[in-house]
């Protein structure tokens, strides 16, 4: 369990029945101390403050999604897995949006297949 999840579990126990009076527990990663959702605008502001405090290049939360998907595809994570993780209903949408991340894959595929057929030449 990560330290964040451990801290959140402690908050949940401390809050008792006051923890999120939502009809269902959505198992949110980032919450207010009572387990309710942080409004998106507030979460973005909090994120930006952390980025600035760490002296990192400015990127929005949505930019993290694009960065993760691009890096995952370049690392060889299957398009279907990336599509599911970022919430696209159809991998074809992911392919259209992230085609730039797969540039050069044709050459890599040819080299990999050639090595499998002919061995290292």
Image (cartoon, rainbow, N blue to C red):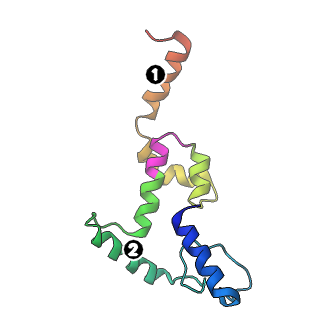
Please count the marks in the image.
2
x%, y% of residue 99? 46, 47
7 vs 42, left or right, is right
Above or below — where is 115 with respect to 26? Answer: above
Q: Start and end of the magenta stretch?
A: 70-77
- The tag on residue 47 is 2
- Is residue 84 a member of the stretch shown in magenta? no
**Which of 9 and 25 lies nearest the eye of the viewer?**
9
User: Is residue 87 shown left or right of residue 54?
Assistant: right
- Residue at the outermost left position: 55
- Residue located farthest toward the right when viewing the structure as drawn: 23
User: Circle 1 — which element?
Assistant: helix
Q: CA distance from mark 1 to mark 2?
A: 41 Å
Give me the residue at 50% from left, 16% from top: 115
Which label was assigned to residue 15?
none
> In the image shown, does 64 or 3 lie closer to the viewer?
3
What residue would you read off at disc 1?
A: 111
Image position, residue 13 (x, y; %):
65, 81
Image quarter where the C terminus lies is: top left
């Amino acid at each position: 369990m990560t330290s964040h999840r451990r801290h959140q579990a402690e908050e949940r126990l401390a809050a008792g029945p006051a923890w999120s009076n939502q009809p269902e527990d959505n198992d949110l990663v980032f919450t207010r101390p009572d387990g309710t959702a942080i409004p998106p605008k507030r979460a973005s502001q909090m994120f930006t403050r952390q980025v600035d405090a760490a002296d990192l290049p400015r990127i929005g939360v949505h930019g993290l999604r694009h960065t993760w998907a691009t890096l995952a595809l370049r690392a060889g994570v299957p398009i279907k897995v990336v599509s599911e993780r970022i919430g696209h209903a159809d991998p074809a949408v992911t392919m259209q949006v992230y085609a730039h991340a797969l540039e050069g894959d044709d050459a890599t595929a040819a080299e990999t297949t050639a090595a499998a057929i002919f061995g290292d030449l």
